[in-house]
Structures are given as structure tokens and as C-alpha cells.
Image (cartoon, grey):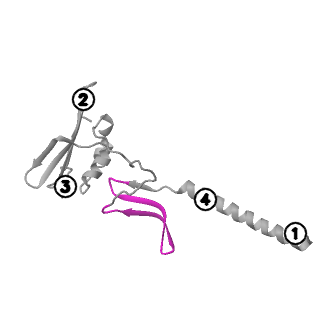
Amino acid sequence: MTREMKMKMKVEMKSMWKLAASVALGVVANAAIAVDTFDPASNKLSLDSVVLNGVVYNNVVVTLNSYTLISVGSSAPYNPVAAACSDVNFTVAKYNAIVPGMTLDQVKQTIGCANDSKWTTAVGSTLVRLGWYYYNPSNRNTSLILVEFDGTGTRVNSDPNNLGLFKSRSGF
């Protein structure tokens, strides 16, 4: 092998190592900062980056008007809703996350359990009040969240005066 061939091979090896190191560094850097999240209470999807028509957009926040969860990388549901409520479902943070316009499924996801049909009541002809209820026999505490929905029971009623009158709570 000539000296010229050895030099050329050495330069090519250096270039390959630089390329491999750059790719590895890029993968590690992207893995460290890539945090994609979805907030069902506000319907906000936050993405580290999106490529659209060849243009890269970073730190993207999208508000979804409606969505269907197709997959989350496994056959298990993303956030299963328990059939019955327990103490963990009744927190001020979960209650505060319920906002007008949310669907019934979004409210169930937020609270983490299904509503109790015993607490379903009609409010006039245009509203339905649904309730989430839990009685803890060990401390005899009753927790309750009531939320007013439209007449079909599918979307949280709007509150034009922002007084929080579309929901109420007790026991926590």
C-alpha cells in the first residue's frame, strides 16, 4: 500500500469517526430535551419539534379541538379510567382542572374514575348534572364532585360569567 493510499484511508476513517460522533451526540442531545406532553384539561399538545413541508418547528404547542387516541406505543390504554372512584381521585388539582367545554371522557380522564350514575340528575331541560362519589368507610369521609353538562351529557356546560357555577365539590 502506497503512502498516498494510507493517508487517504486515514482521512476517510477520521471523517467516518466524526460523522459517527456527530450522530451519536445528536441522538443523545435530542433524547435529553425531547419532552412531548398532552394536557387533557386544556387540550394542549406540546411537542419538542415538528417537521412540516421540510421546515423544522421547535417548541410547538397545539390546541386540539377534538382528538381520538390511536396508540401510545402499546396495547394498554394511556390513562385507564377506574370503574369506581377512591380517595386518590378527589384532589383540588383534579377538580380545578375541570373547565367548561371539556367532554365527558376528558372529565373522566382528569378525575381518573367513572361517574356514578346514582348522582346523575336533570337540571331543567338543557342541563345534566353528573357526579363522582366515594365514601371511605375507614374515616367515614364522603367525597363528591358534581359537574353540569349540556343536555346530552357530553360537554361541560359553559359558564358565561366565569363564576365556577358549572361544578361543585365537597369532602376534600
Q: Which residue is mark 1?
A: 6
Q: Nearer the viewer, mark 4 or mark 2?
A: 4
Q: N-terminal of the two: label 1 or label 3? A: 1
Q: 170 or 52, which lies in front?
A: 52
Q: CA distance from mark 4 to mark 2?
A: 51 Å
Q: Position of residue 1 (x, y in %)?
A: 91, 70
Quarter in which the C terminus is drawn: top left
Q: Nearer the viewer, mark 1 or mark 3?
A: 1
Q: CA distance from mark 1 to mark 4?
A: 32 Å
**Magenta stretch: includes residue 65:** yes
Q: Nearer the viewer, mark 4 or mark 3?
A: 4
Q: Which residue is mark 2?
A: 141
Q: Secondary structure at mark 4?
A: helix
Q: Which residues are magenta?
A: 39-66
Q: CA distance from mark 2 to mark 1?
A: 81 Å
Q: Which residue is mark 4?
A: 27
Q: Secondary structure at mark 1?
A: helix
Identity of the amino acid at label 2? Asn
- Residue at image x 72%, y 64%? 18
Residue 41 falls left or right of residue 150? right
Q: 67 or 160, which lies in front?
A: 67
Contact? badges 4 and 3 (CB < 8 Å)? no
Q: Which residue is mark 3?
A: 157
Identity of the amino acid at label 3? Asn
Majority secondary structure in the magenta region = strand
Q: Nearer the viewer, mark 2 or mark 1?
A: 1
Q: Secondary structure at mark 2?
A: strand
Residue 58 falls left or right of residue 85? right
